[in-house]
């Protein structure tokens, strides 16, 4: 499966988690889309998590990836105002946002 397809799958997973007001760990999120271990999401330039993050930024949407946390419940350090960013994701009406086509996750 291509990284863009995984990113689309990850998007859908995060939407479901946001609807339930859940903060999945990186490991849970990775395994939910068929990866083994949290590093598989890839925080680097071409990683699945980066693709979703960048899509949200480009389209002025709440940053879906803000709800993914470390196994001890800590947020990623890049989120300076994490409680507010997480709550913005939870409060947003994602049902009005269609699942982006795979091509939208190309970097």
Image (spheres, rainbow, N blue to C red):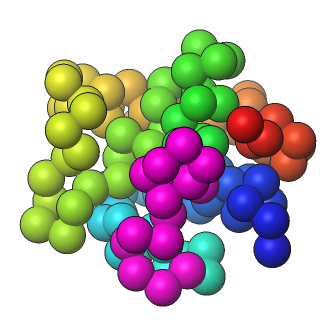
Quadrant holding the N terminus: bottom right
> As rendered, which of 92 and 82 lies closer to the eye?
82
Residue 63 can be seen in this image = yes
- Is residue 40 left or right of 97 when viewed as pictured? left
Which residue occupies 61% across, 82% down?
34
> Which residue of the protein is positioned furthest toward the front in this rendering?
45
The residue positioned farthest toward the top in the image shown? 60
Q: Position of residue 77 (x, y in %)?
A: 18, 38
Residue at position x 19%, y 23% in the image? 81
Tell me the chief SS of the magenta region: loop
Tell me if 22 is positioned left or right of 81 in this view: right
The answer to which quarter of the image holds residue 104 is top right
- The one nearer the camera, 58 or 22, is 58
- Can I make out residue 16 in this image? no
Where is residue 83 drawn, in percent x and y? 19, 32
Question: Image quarter for residue 6?
Answer: bottom right
Q: Which residues are magenta?
A: 35-49
Residue 19 covered by magenta stretch: no
Where does the image place residue 99, in percent across and percent down from the top left?
Answer: 79, 43
Q: Is 54 drawn above or below residue 33 in the view shown?
A: above
Left or right, 92 with respect to 72, comes to right
Residue 47 among magenta residues: yes
> In percent of the image, x 49 and y 25: which residue is there?
62
Residue 76 in the image, given as x and y percentages of width and height: 24, 45
For this view, does 8 lie left or right of residue 76? right
Question: In this picture, is 85 found above or below 41?
Answer: above
Towards the viewer: 25 or 1: 1
Question: Residue placed at 68% from the left, 54% from the top?
Answer: 7
Which quadrant, please, contains the C terminus?
A: top right
């Amino acid at each position: 499966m291509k990284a863009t397809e995984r990113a689309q799958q990850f998007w859908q997973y995060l939407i479901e988690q946001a609807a339930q007001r859940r903060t999945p760990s990186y490991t849970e999120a990775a395994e939910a889309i068929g990866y083994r271990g949290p590093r598989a999401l890839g925080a680097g330039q071409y990683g699945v998590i980066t693709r979703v993050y960048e899509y949200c930024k480009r389209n002025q949407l709440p940053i879906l990836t803000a709800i993914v946390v470390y196994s001890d419940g800590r947020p990623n350090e890049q989120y300076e105002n994490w409680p507010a960013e997480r709550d913005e994701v939870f409060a947003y009406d994602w049902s009005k946002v269609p699942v982006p086509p795979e091509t939208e996750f190309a970097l």
